Image (cartoon, helix red, strand yellow):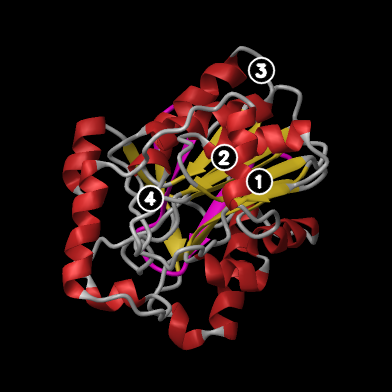
Amino acid sequence: MGASVLSASGLLVACANRSGGTAMDNKPIVVSTWDFGVVANQAAWKVLNANGRALDAVEAGVRVAEADLTNMTVGKGGYPDRDGHVTLDACIMDEAGNCGSVAAIQHIAHPISVARMVMEKTPHVMLVGEGALQFALENGFEKEELLTPEGEKAWKEWLKEKKYEPVINIENKSFATAKLPGNQYNHDTIGMLAMDMNGNLSGACTTSGMAFKMYGRVGDSPIIGAGLYVDNEIGAATATGVGEEVIRTVGSFLVVELMRQGLSPQDACREAVERIIKKKPDTAKEIQVGFLAMNKQGEYGAFSLQQGFSYAVCGKDKQDLLVKGESVY
Protein backbone atom coordinates (compact mmCIF):
# COMPACT_ATOMS: atom_id res chain seq x y z
CA MET A 1 0.00 0.00 0.00
CA GLY A 2 1.31 3.39 -0.89
CA ALA A 3 1.96 5.97 1.76
CA SER A 4 -0.39 8.32 -0.05
CA VAL A 5 -3.30 5.98 0.54
CA LEU A 6 -2.65 5.86 4.24
CA SER A 7 -1.99 9.56 4.66
CA ALA A 8 -5.10 10.46 2.73
CA SER A 9 -7.33 8.30 4.88
CA GLY A 10 -5.58 8.99 8.16
CA LEU A 11 -5.74 5.35 9.12
CA LEU A 12 -3.91 3.75 12.00
CA VAL A 13 -1.62 0.88 11.08
CA ALA A 14 -0.59 -1.45 13.87
CA CYS A 15 1.03 -4.83 14.21
CA ALA A 16 -1.18 -7.72 15.21
CA ASN A 17 -0.18 -9.49 18.39
CA ARG A 18 0.29 -13.22 18.48
CA SER A 19 -2.79 -13.86 20.58
CA GLY A 20 -4.92 -12.18 17.95
CA GLY A 21 -6.35 -10.01 20.72
CA THR A 22 -8.98 -7.42 20.10
CA ALA A 23 -8.31 -3.71 20.00
CA MET A 24 -11.73 -3.03 21.48
CA ASP A 25 -14.41 -4.64 23.61
CA ASN A 26 -16.06 -7.68 22.12
CA LYS A 27 -19.36 -7.32 20.31
CA PRO A 28 -20.43 -5.92 18.03
CA ILE A 29 -17.38 -6.10 15.82
CA VAL A 30 -16.58 -6.48 12.14
CA VAL A 31 -13.29 -7.32 10.41
CA SER A 32 -12.44 -7.53 6.73
CA THR A 33 -9.49 -8.05 4.40
CA TRP A 34 -7.28 -5.32 2.94
CA ASP A 35 -7.26 -1.55 3.18
CA PHE A 36 -10.51 -1.18 1.24
CA GLY A 37 -12.11 -3.06 4.11
CA VAL A 38 -12.03 0.09 6.24
CA VAL A 39 -14.81 1.81 4.30
CA ALA A 40 -16.67 -1.46 3.87
CA ASN A 41 -16.55 -2.07 7.62
CA GLN A 42 -18.09 1.32 8.31
CA ALA A 43 -21.10 0.41 6.19
CA ALA A 44 -21.41 -2.85 8.11
CA TRP A 45 -21.02 -0.98 11.39
CA LYS A 46 -24.11 1.12 10.70
CA VAL A 47 -26.12 -2.10 10.75
CA LEU A 48 -24.39 -3.54 13.80
CA ASN A 49 -24.55 -0.30 15.78
CA ALA A 50 -28.30 -0.18 15.23
CA ASN A 51 -28.55 -3.66 16.81
CA GLY A 52 -28.85 -5.22 13.38
CA ARG A 53 -28.05 -8.76 12.35
CA ALA A 54 -24.51 -9.77 11.43
CA LEU A 55 -25.77 -11.23 8.14
CA ASP A 56 -27.24 -7.90 7.07
CA ALA A 57 -24.05 -6.16 8.14
CA VAL A 58 -21.67 -8.26 6.05
CA GLU A 59 -23.86 -7.99 2.97
CA ALA A 60 -24.06 -4.21 3.30
CA GLY A 61 -20.34 -3.99 3.93
CA VAL A 62 -19.02 -5.93 0.98
CA ARG A 63 -21.50 -4.24 -1.37
CA VAL A 64 -19.40 -1.10 -0.84
CA ALA A 65 -16.35 -2.85 -2.28
CA GLU A 66 -18.41 -4.32 -5.12
CA ALA A 67 -19.55 -0.81 -6.11
CA ASP A 68 -16.08 0.76 -5.98
CA LEU A 69 -14.97 1.30 -9.57
CA THR A 70 -11.39 1.93 -8.45
CA ASN A 71 -11.13 -1.56 -6.95
CA MET A 72 -9.78 -3.77 -9.74
CA THR A 73 -10.26 -7.04 -7.86
CA VAL A 74 -13.86 -6.84 -6.66
CA GLY A 75 -17.18 -6.16 -8.35
CA LYS A 76 -17.85 -3.86 -11.26
CA GLY A 77 -14.34 -2.40 -11.25
CA GLY A 78 -12.76 -5.84 -11.53
CA TYR A 79 -10.40 -6.73 -14.35
CA PRO A 80 -11.71 -9.17 -16.97
CA ASP A 81 -10.57 -12.65 -17.86
CA ARG A 82 -8.25 -13.18 -20.83
CA ASP A 83 -11.24 -13.22 -23.19
CA GLY A 84 -12.53 -9.87 -21.94
CA HIS A 85 -15.37 -11.10 -19.71
CA VAL A 86 -15.84 -9.75 -16.18
CA THR A 87 -17.03 -12.71 -14.14
CA LEU A 88 -17.81 -12.40 -10.45
CA ASP A 89 -17.91 -14.85 -7.53
CA ALA A 90 -19.41 -14.47 -4.06
CA CYS A 91 -20.71 -16.38 -1.07
CA ILE A 92 -22.42 -15.61 2.24
CA MET A 93 -23.03 -17.63 5.40
CA ASP A 94 -25.08 -16.98 8.55
CA GLU A 95 -25.02 -18.10 12.17
CA ALA A 96 -27.27 -21.09 11.51
CA GLY A 97 -25.04 -22.56 8.83
CA ASN A 98 -27.24 -21.37 5.98
CA CYS A 99 -25.20 -20.36 2.97
CA GLY A 100 -25.50 -19.23 -0.62
CA SER A 101 -23.08 -18.75 -3.48
CA VAL A 102 -22.74 -17.66 -7.09
CA ALA A 103 -19.78 -18.29 -9.36
CA ALA A 104 -18.74 -16.97 -12.78
CA ILE A 105 -21.77 -14.70 -12.92
CA GLN A 106 -21.70 -11.89 -15.50
CA HIS A 107 -23.60 -8.58 -15.83
CA ILE A 108 -24.64 -8.33 -12.16
CA ALA A 109 -22.90 -5.67 -10.07
CA HIS A 110 -23.69 -7.15 -6.64
CA PRO A 111 -23.11 -10.91 -6.65
CA ILE A 112 -23.18 -11.01 -2.85
CA SER A 113 -26.86 -10.11 -2.86
CA VAL A 114 -27.57 -12.78 -5.46
CA ALA A 115 -25.72 -15.27 -3.25
CA ARG A 116 -27.90 -14.32 -0.30
CA MET A 117 -31.00 -14.78 -2.44
CA VAL A 118 -29.77 -18.24 -3.47
CA MET A 119 -29.47 -19.02 0.23
CA GLU A 120 -32.90 -17.72 1.14
CA LYS A 121 -35.02 -18.53 -1.91
CA THR A 122 -33.69 -21.82 -3.28
CA PRO A 123 -32.94 -25.32 -1.96
CA HIS A 124 -29.41 -24.98 -3.35
CA VAL A 125 -26.13 -23.52 -2.13
CA MET A 126 -24.47 -22.53 -5.42
CA LEU A 127 -25.59 -21.31 -8.83
CA VAL A 128 -23.07 -20.66 -11.61
CA GLY A 129 -22.69 -18.93 -14.95
CA GLU A 130 -25.79 -18.50 -17.09
CA GLY A 131 -27.97 -20.16 -14.47
CA ALA A 132 -26.88 -17.68 -11.83
CA LEU A 133 -27.52 -14.78 -14.21
CA GLN A 134 -30.97 -16.10 -15.12
CA PHE A 135 -31.85 -16.45 -11.43
CA ALA A 136 -30.66 -12.92 -10.70
CA LEU A 137 -32.66 -11.38 -13.54
CA GLU A 138 -35.77 -13.32 -12.55
CA ASN A 139 -35.44 -11.85 -9.07
CA GLY A 140 -35.18 -8.22 -10.07
CA PHE A 141 -31.46 -7.63 -10.48
CA GLU A 142 -30.51 -5.35 -13.36
CA LYS A 143 -28.28 -6.52 -16.18
CA GLU A 144 -25.39 -4.16 -16.88
CA GLU A 145 -21.97 -3.94 -18.51
CA LEU A 146 -19.30 -4.62 -15.90
CA LEU A 147 -16.21 -3.98 -18.02
CA THR A 148 -15.04 -0.47 -17.19
CA PRO A 149 -12.92 1.65 -19.55
CA GLU A 150 -9.98 1.15 -17.19
CA GLY A 151 -10.47 -2.61 -17.14
CA GLU A 152 -10.76 -2.77 -20.91
CA LYS A 153 -7.58 -0.73 -21.31
CA ALA A 154 -5.65 -3.00 -18.95
CA TRP A 155 -6.93 -6.07 -20.77
CA LYS A 156 -5.87 -4.73 -24.18
CA GLU A 157 -2.43 -3.92 -22.79
CA TRP A 158 -2.19 -7.47 -21.50
CA LEU A 159 -3.10 -8.84 -24.92
CA LYS A 160 -0.12 -7.00 -26.43
CA GLU A 161 2.23 -8.73 -24.02
CA LYS A 162 1.00 -12.30 -24.25
CA LYS A 163 -1.27 -14.27 -26.52
CA TYR A 164 -3.83 -16.65 -25.11
CA GLU A 165 -2.20 -19.70 -23.56
CA PRO A 166 -3.92 -21.99 -21.06
CA VAL A 167 -1.12 -21.94 -18.51
CA ILE A 168 -1.81 -21.36 -14.83
CA ASN A 169 -0.76 -17.89 -13.69
CA ILE A 170 0.63 -17.00 -17.11
CA GLU A 171 -0.47 -13.43 -16.43
CA ASN A 172 2.09 -13.15 -13.65
CA LYS A 173 4.92 -13.93 -16.10
CA SER A 174 3.89 -11.67 -18.93
CA PHE A 175 2.21 -8.56 -17.61
CA ALA A 176 4.78 -5.93 -16.69
CA THR A 177 3.54 -4.75 -13.32
CA ALA A 178 4.20 -5.63 -9.71
CA LYS A 179 0.56 -4.91 -8.87
CA LEU A 180 -1.09 -7.69 -10.84
CA PRO A 181 -3.80 -9.51 -8.87
CA GLY A 182 -2.77 -13.01 -7.89
CA ASN A 183 0.96 -12.55 -7.49
CA GLN A 184 2.80 -12.09 -4.22
CA TYR A 185 2.47 -8.31 -4.32
CA ASN A 186 -1.24 -8.10 -4.83
CA HIS A 187 -4.47 -9.90 -4.14
CA ASP A 188 -8.11 -10.27 -4.84
CA THR A 189 -11.23 -10.56 -2.72
CA ILE A 190 -12.87 -8.81 0.18
CA GLY A 191 -13.77 -11.20 2.95
CA MET A 192 -15.76 -9.88 5.91
CA LEU A 193 -16.67 -11.40 9.28
CA ALA A 194 -19.05 -9.84 11.80
CA MET A 195 -20.40 -10.51 15.26
CA ASP A 196 -23.62 -8.73 16.26
CA MET A 197 -24.93 -7.70 19.67
CA ASN A 198 -26.49 -11.13 20.12
CA GLY A 199 -23.09 -12.76 19.68
CA ASN A 200 -24.03 -14.30 16.34
CA LEU A 201 -21.49 -14.58 13.54
CA SER A 202 -21.88 -14.22 9.78
CA GLY A 203 -19.50 -13.80 6.88
CA ALA A 204 -19.34 -12.73 3.24
CA CYS A 205 -16.74 -13.01 0.50
CA THR A 206 -16.82 -11.47 -2.99
CA THR A 207 -14.36 -11.06 -5.86
CA SER A 208 -13.83 -10.65 -9.58
CA GLY A 209 -11.05 -13.24 -9.38
CA MET A 210 -7.61 -13.08 -10.90
CA ALA A 211 -7.07 -10.63 -13.71
CA PHE A 212 -6.87 -12.27 -17.15
CA LYS A 213 -7.75 -15.71 -15.78
CA MET A 214 -8.97 -18.43 -18.13
CA TYR A 215 -12.63 -18.04 -19.04
CA GLY A 216 -14.63 -20.09 -16.56
CA ARG A 217 -11.99 -20.17 -13.85
CA VAL A 218 -13.38 -20.03 -10.32
CA GLY A 219 -11.25 -19.61 -7.23
CA ASP A 220 -11.96 -20.13 -3.55
CA SER A 221 -14.12 -17.08 -2.89
CA PRO A 222 -17.56 -18.59 -3.65
CA ILE A 223 -16.74 -21.98 -2.12
CA ILE A 224 -18.02 -22.55 1.40
CA GLY A 225 -15.18 -23.97 3.47
CA ALA A 226 -12.50 -22.53 1.22
CA GLY A 227 -13.04 -18.79 0.87
CA LEU A 228 -15.40 -18.53 3.83
CA TYR A 229 -16.67 -20.59 6.75
CA VAL A 230 -18.81 -19.76 9.78
CA ASP A 231 -19.45 -21.96 12.80
CA ASN A 232 -21.44 -20.03 15.38
CA GLU A 233 -20.16 -22.22 18.21
CA ILE A 234 -16.49 -21.56 17.44
CA GLY A 235 -15.79 -18.71 15.06
CA ALA A 236 -15.46 -17.71 11.43
CA ALA A 237 -12.71 -17.36 8.84
CA THR A 238 -12.19 -16.00 5.35
CA ALA A 239 -9.38 -16.14 2.82
CA THR A 240 -7.78 -13.97 0.17
CA GLY A 241 -5.12 -14.46 -2.49
CA VAL A 242 -4.58 -17.30 -4.94
CA GLY A 243 -7.71 -19.37 -4.58
CA GLU A 244 -6.34 -22.61 -5.98
CA GLU A 245 -4.10 -23.05 -2.95
CA VAL A 246 -6.91 -22.16 -0.54
CA ILE A 247 -9.17 -24.76 -2.15
CA ARG A 248 -6.51 -27.45 -1.85
CA THR A 249 -6.40 -27.00 1.92
CA VAL A 250 -10.10 -26.14 2.44
CA GLY A 251 -8.53 -23.19 4.16
CA SER A 252 -11.29 -21.34 5.98
CA PHE A 253 -12.83 -24.52 7.33
CA LEU A 254 -9.36 -25.56 8.48
CA VAL A 255 -8.89 -22.29 10.35
CA VAL A 256 -12.20 -22.70 12.18
CA GLU A 257 -11.39 -26.30 13.10
CA LEU A 258 -8.00 -25.23 14.43
CA MET A 259 -9.77 -22.66 16.61
CA ARG A 260 -12.04 -25.49 17.80
CA GLN A 261 -8.89 -27.26 18.97
CA GLY A 262 -7.98 -24.25 21.07
CA LEU A 263 -5.76 -22.15 18.81
CA SER A 264 -6.18 -18.38 18.80
CA PRO A 265 -7.48 -16.83 15.57
CA GLN A 266 -4.01 -15.69 14.58
CA ASP A 267 -2.31 -18.99 15.37
CA ALA A 268 -5.02 -20.85 13.47
CA CYS A 269 -4.41 -18.63 10.44
CA ARG A 270 -0.67 -19.20 10.76
CA GLU A 271 -1.10 -22.98 10.79
CA ALA A 272 -3.34 -22.83 7.71
CA VAL A 273 -0.70 -20.84 5.86
CA GLU A 274 1.97 -23.33 6.88
CA ARG A 275 -0.14 -26.16 5.48
CA ILE A 276 0.03 -24.46 2.08
CA ILE A 277 3.81 -24.24 2.34
CA LYS A 278 4.05 -27.93 3.27
CA LYS A 279 2.00 -28.95 0.24
CA LYS A 280 3.67 -26.64 -2.30
CA PRO A 281 6.82 -25.05 -0.87
CA ASP A 282 8.11 -23.66 -4.16
CA THR A 283 4.76 -22.24 -5.25
CA ALA A 284 4.16 -20.68 -1.85
CA LYS A 285 7.21 -18.44 -2.23
CA GLU A 286 5.78 -16.80 -5.34
CA ILE A 287 2.15 -16.17 -4.44
CA GLN A 288 0.05 -14.48 -1.79
CA VAL A 289 -2.53 -16.17 0.41
CA GLY A 290 -3.89 -14.71 3.60
CA PHE A 291 -6.41 -15.83 6.21
CA LEU A 292 -8.48 -13.71 8.59
CA ALA A 293 -10.40 -15.18 11.53
CA MET A 294 -12.59 -14.26 14.49
CA ASN A 295 -13.65 -16.43 17.41
CA LYS A 296 -16.76 -16.31 19.58
CA GLN A 297 -15.03 -14.10 22.11
CA GLY A 298 -14.59 -11.41 19.48
CA GLU A 299 -10.85 -12.01 19.24
CA TYR A 300 -9.44 -11.70 15.74
CA GLY A 301 -6.20 -12.42 13.94
CA ALA A 302 -4.66 -12.98 10.53
CA PHE A 303 -1.62 -14.46 8.83
CA SER A 304 -0.32 -14.58 5.26
CA LEU A 305 2.40 -16.01 3.08
CA GLN A 306 3.90 -12.70 1.99
CA GLN A 307 4.31 -9.31 3.61
CA GLY A 308 1.77 -6.65 2.73
CA PHE A 309 -1.46 -8.28 3.87
CA SER A 310 -3.58 -5.91 5.93
CA TYR A 311 -6.99 -6.18 7.50
CA ALA A 312 -9.51 -3.69 8.81
CA VAL A 313 -11.23 -3.76 12.20
CA CYS A 314 -14.31 -1.83 13.28
CA GLY A 315 -15.91 -1.74 16.72
CA LYS A 316 -17.45 0.66 19.19
CA ASP A 317 -14.12 2.21 20.20
CA LYS A 318 -12.66 2.69 16.73
CA GLN A 319 -14.15 2.37 13.28
CA ASP A 320 -11.10 2.79 11.02
CA LEU A 321 -8.39 0.54 12.41
CA LEU A 322 -6.11 -0.98 9.79
CA VAL A 323 -3.83 -3.75 11.03
CA LYS A 324 -0.63 -4.92 9.41
CA GLY A 325 -0.80 -8.69 9.41
CA GLU A 326 2.14 -10.99 10.07
CA SER A 327 3.56 -13.25 7.37
CA VAL A 328 5.94 -16.13 6.76
CA TYR A 329 8.06 -14.43 4.10
Q: Position of residue 198 (x, y in %)?
A: 76, 23
The residues tagged by marks 1 and 2 sit, at their Cα atoms, a distance apart of 30 Å
The residues tagged by marks 2 and 4 sit, at their Cα atoms, a distance apart of 28 Å
48 lies above or below 9? above
What element does badge 1 sit on? strand
Residue at 38% from the left image edge and 60% from the top image edge: 81
What element does badge 4 sit on? loop
Q: Give the mark, 3 or 1, whose residue is nearer the N terminus.
A: 3
Q: Give the mark, 3 or 2, whose residue is nearer the N terminus.
A: 2
Magenta stretch: give its range.
Answer: 293-321
Q: Residue 22 carries which label?
A: 2
Q: Give the mark, 4 or 1, whose residue is nearer the N terminus.
A: 4
Marks 2 and 1: in contact by CB < 8 Å? Answer: no
- Foreground pick, 278 / 317: 278
The answer to whether residue 314 is seen in the rendering is no
Camera-nearest label, 1 or 2: 1
- Foreground pick, 94 / 197: 94
The residues tagged by marks 4 and 3 sit, at their Cα atoms, a distance apart of 28 Å
Q: Which residue has dot 4 on it?
A: 73
